[in-house]
Amino acid sequence: MRLTVMLSKIAKFSTDYSNLPESYIKRAMRQVYWEAPRDLPQYLPVTLEKKKFRYTMNRPWTEEFRRQNLSRRKKVFVEPLKEWTFFRGDRVEVLVGKDKGKIGLVSQIIEERNWVVVEGLNVHYRWIGKTDDYPGTVIQSEAPLLVTNEVALVDPSDDKGTKVEWRFTEQGEKVRVSKRTGHIIPVPISASETIDFKAKAGYPEQEKDTRAADMSEHTYIPQSKTFEMDLMEHYRLE
Amino acid sequence: MLLTFNDLSSLIDFVFLSFRPANSTSIHMTSFKSSNLMQFFDDPKNFGASEVKSGRSWTVDELRIKSNIDLQKLWFVLLKERNMLLTMEYNCREACYLFPSPERIDKIQDSMTRLEQVIHERNDAYWQLEIGEEAPKPRAEKTLDPTDPLAAIREPIEAVTQVKDRATLKFQYLIKEKERKLKLKQKRLHEREAAMLLKYFPNMDKEALQAKYPDVNVEKLKFVQRTRGSHEFNTA
């Protein structure tokens, strides 16, 4: 149970939101202690690398995550969930702490720890940029909340937290239904938001990006030829 | 990375030109434009940038609708971009500068791998139809099975155990013992993890737990001492 097991522990949402290829995330997270030289046959192709990562508020491909994972720490037990029910932009009610009962929007999701960060709620204050003579600036930072028992989705009909279930509508669509009232809680639009764009249509095409029209242009006509044969005929090399 | 087909004329020049050594007596490199070497480097406005935005890589379905000529052109566009990125990465490392957006290299690599896959599919179709065999793959893929604990030595094991003599039989017995032990170790680890999860999360969904650890009997875990927390849930 090695190799790709490391990557499978990163939730799909994290990779989707970041717009980063999986191989890059794997490469950025990698901490290799020792790797056998592949060109010498007397060594088995082993790689001694870090396999157990502690997922934090920092994303796995960042430098801060790497620094937090340099030393080995106590194991964190994360409750396995069948389905994930929270999305960015969801209205949730905080159930614990000094902001108990207040409603806020989900700003960040860390699925690997069953965490959700609610904007402006469950905050603590910390000082940054402190030097010997300058006291620094105080900033507000939100602490994450556990999805299982510290946060509840808000039922739009009565603005109170409820337990939620995934059910199918008559049309076959999978929706979240509040267990108390039976009201459907729609998935917010900002759920499909990523770091690069708020909506796919609003993505500004970069210089080196292929234009959408060019990309969807159908130019292939299947023929009984291999790739090489087709090219040779085209360039008249036969 | 979604890339353009716009620079085709310069592309063909680049691909088919031969490089002359710098100290040769032949005068000027006539067909060389000085900008050709600068194609190894990024746009100057990206020098010292902390981030360079780029689109996603090509998907297999998007590549399948392109003709073979288009795929060939795309390959070289991707190759040039990859060379440029690798040059930039090397130079940034040498000069101790931050290389912006290193995920671009992985996006290109994904596009190129999928391009090769599409070409192989088309060749395979012809070979299966006309010749009756599978098309040969130019590069031998060597991906190890992640579920096999002895994946790194599976090939040599199979090679050695072809001859059935006393030594290989003894070897096979020992290898099976090793596999058995590793499997048991894995199972015990999962049982321990599942028991600890039950201890810390007594009200959790047992089906989700069973799905996460398919080789563990979650029902039997309530008889295990380890699941006892400061509560009476999940105990026999």
Image (cartoon, coloured by chain):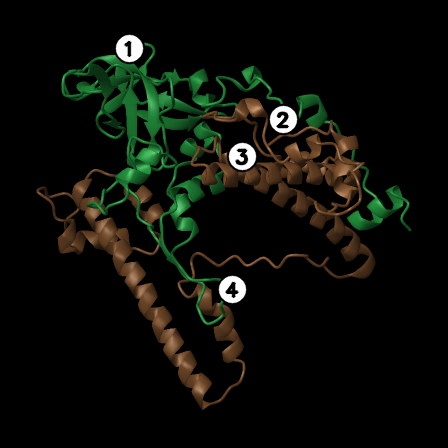
- Asked where in the image residue A144 lies, by quadrant, the reply is top left
Q: Amino acid at mark 1?
A: Asp
> Which of these two is toward me, B93 or B141?
B93
What chain does mark 2 sit on?
A: A
Q: What kind of element bears circle 4? A: loop
Q: What kind of element bears circle 3? A: helix
Which chain appears green? Answer: A
| Mark 3 surroundings: few (<14), some (14-19) or many (≥20) residues within 10 A | many
Q: Amino acid at mark 4?
A: Asp
State the CA–CA distance, disc 3 to disc 2. Answer: 11 Å
Instruction: Tell me the colour chain B is drawn in.
Output: brown
Q: Which mark is residue B104?
A: 3
Query: Measured from the top left, where is residue B229 in percent x and y?
Result: 11, 45
Q: What kind of element bears circle 2? A: loop
- Asked where in the image residue A216 lies, by quadrant, the reply is top right
Q: Which mark lies nearer to you, 3 or 1?
A: 3
| Residue denoted by label 4 | A39
Nearer-N-terminus badge (1/4): 4
Q: Total of numbered circles in the picture?
A: 4
Q: Amino acid at mark 3?
A: Arg
Query: Measured from the top left, where is residue A44 in percent x and y?
Result: 44, 67
Query: Measured from the top left, where is residue B34 in percent x and y?
Result: 71, 32
- Do discs 3 and 1 belong to a common subunit? no
What chain does mark 3 sit on?
A: B
State the CA–CA distance, disc 3 to disc 1. Answer: 44 Å
| Residue denoted by label 2 | A208
What chain does mark 1 sit on?
A: A
State the CA–CA distance, disc 1 to disc 4. Answer: 64 Å
